[in-house]
Image (cartoon, rainbow, N blue to C red):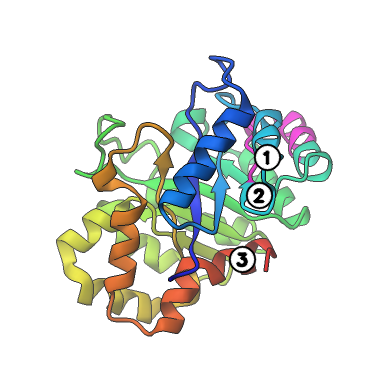
Amino acid sequence: MFHVVDFHVHPPFDAEEKRISPSDVAQDLLEWMDKNNLSKTIILPIAPYISNDYIYKIVEKDPKRLIGFASVIPNPYDKALRELRRAIQDLGLKGLKLHPALQGFCIRNTHFWKLLKSAGELNVPVIIHALWMDESTLYFKSFYTPWEYPVEDYALLPYIAPETKIVFAHMGGLLRFREILNIATHNNIYLDTSYSILTIVREIGLERFAHYIKLLGADKFIFGSDTILGLTPEDLGVKSQFDIIKSLPLSEEEKEKILYRNAERLLKIF
């Protein structure tokens, strides 16, 4: 039996709008976790679709297994910082989730840069959407527009906020995997494996993917599934992605780092 932390799970995006009880969402999450043998799950909102207060109420159900992150829209910075401080200091949320495409901000925006640095000062990690669309996009169809969020902008972030722990979600996807790996050589950059691991391994194979992990170091990779409760198809879900990690030609210690140790170290939840 593996100890597994899923670093990348979303509640239904319309749950708060539909006035679904946070307790009911939490119960659904816990049942899903039990079914998939997950020890802990990181619950990621995306502002303004779900509020930080709603996430807090979900986490209240079982704070040992459900770990909540905050989300704010970075612009304007002063308002974003007030809300982030409230979410971290008053609500006890453990990190910050940002999604440039869905939240409509530019990676080069100075409001975003200042917020990123402030998260480091608050001593919480930031997880940023970093997926350039490929054939893995099953239920979020969109045009491939690399000029809107060029990978070169992401390469600035280790220099902009060197004291902030930054997690690039999805490892860049199949289209930008190698560039994102290069950026992750910086001490403060980590990669969550969510979703893209399916297409990357299908394209390059288990051996080659394990080779990249060894080159960068298993300390840099964090297991996540990008599950959206009630929406993610079974064949793209947490079990399929866990099976890939389990099958990689890596040591048990390296697999443990990816599956839970790195997440728990980053969040200080040993």
Q: Secondary structure at mark 3?
A: helix
Q: Residues within 10 Å of mark 3 (few under 14, many from 20)?
A: some
x, y percent for residue 119: 71, 50
Q: Is residue 69 magenta?
A: yes
The residue at 41%/53% (across/down) is: 36
User: On the image, numbered disc 3 is attached to which residue?
Assistant: 264
Q: Closer to us: mark 1 or mark 3?
A: 1
User: On the picture, is 58 further left or further right than 248?
Assistant: right
User: On the image, numbered disc 1 is attached to which residue?
Assistant: 61
Real-space CA distance between mark 1 and mark 2, rounded to the nearest whole angstrom? 19 Å
x, y percent for residue 191: 45, 61
User: On the image, numbered disc 2 is attached to which residue?
Assistant: 95
Mark 1 or mark 2, earlier in chain? 1
Q: Is residue 2 among the parts visible in the rendering?
A: yes
Magenta segment? 68-84
Real-space CA distance between mark 2 and mark 3, rounded to the nearest whole angstrom? 12 Å
Q: Quadrant of residue 90?
A: top right
Q: Is residue 176 among the parts visible in the rendering?
A: no
Return the residue nearer the eye: 148 or 227.
Answer: 227
User: On the picture, is 135 further left or further right than 93?
Assistant: left
